[in-house]
Image (cartoon, rainbow, N blue to C red):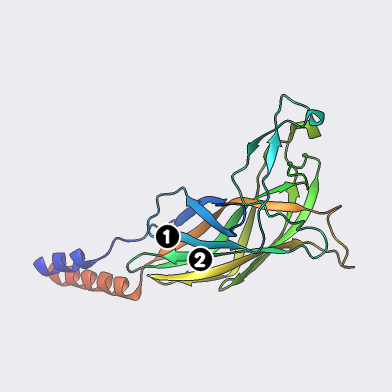
Amino acid sequence: MKRTLAILALLPSLPLAYGWDVSGNFAWPDTTNKTLTYTEVHDVKEISITDVYSDTAYKTVKYWDSTANEGAGALTGVVDSYTPDINVGKGDGTWTLTFTIVNEHATDTMTLNAITLQAIIYDNAGKFQPDNTERFITFTLGGAAQGSVTATLNGAGGNADSDRRENVTNVTLALTEALEIQAKDSATITLTASPKRNADNTLASNGGTHVGLKGATFALIPEPTTTTLSLLALAGLAVRRRRI
């Protein structure tokens, strides 16, 4: 019995069956530095998002004060997000974000199955698009994992341009192959946003699209390593022999 307890004491904590959703917001540090910060909001100490980098400078986006009209030009509330200073949905206005997912767990592998982006759209003046605006953007994941999706992004606001409030469109990219990140290892991923094109190569959106990201959620499933499973098997055998 003592041997069984000793084996069980060696076992690391088992992973949660339902996995972890690690989510947070992208934010900029200053007007010139293209290295962004990622603020984690879930208490998942074994996962971190680092080295978030963009290929373009950001643009400050604000929303209209609901008590003012558009003619008054009353803009309030800077949005805490990454909003590139580029027209992504017009011509070849592609932009990218790269980031590194670090698995700090001592033994278990983390499997990434999907990433949900919190996308926003705005105009050239840095104002949220009204809710009757429809734009199409293709998000693609590259690097160690692959996945792509074309998203329909609706504008933000009430029923009039004078009340352009923040609105987030959740866009989920399911990986074509799950990405495994070994314990104490990392994986760097590139996210690309580009305009959707029709079969005749014309732009799907009626006009350009300024699109940014407020945050992202990473669907991760911790999986026990071979060592962990072996220890579980040994523990099971020890218990069985004790009963015999």
At which x and y percent is residue 117? 61, 54
Whether residue 160 is visible:
no
- Total marks shown come to 2
Point 77% across, 46% down: residue: 123
How would you rate the neighbour count of disc 2 (Cα within 10 Å): few for under 14, some for 14-19, many for 20 or more?
A: some
Disc 2 is placed on an element classified as strand
- The quadrant holding residue 191 is bottom right
Task: Check the picture and name the quadrant holding the C terminus.
Answer: bottom left
What's the distance in space between the residues labelled 2 and 1, CA to CA? Answer: 10 Å
Vertical side of 56 occupied by 156: above or below? above
At which x and y percent is residue 167? 67, 41
How would you rate the neighbour count of disc 1 (Cα within 10 Å): few for under 14, some for 14-19, many for 20 or more?
A: many
At which x and y percent is residue 37? 52, 54
Mark seen at residue 100: 2
Q: Amino acid at mark 1?
A: Ile
Q: Amino acid at mark 2?
A: Thr
Mark seen at residue 47: 1
Q: Residue furthest front?
A: 32
Q: Residue furthest top?
A: 67
- Tell whether 49 sits left or right of 71: left
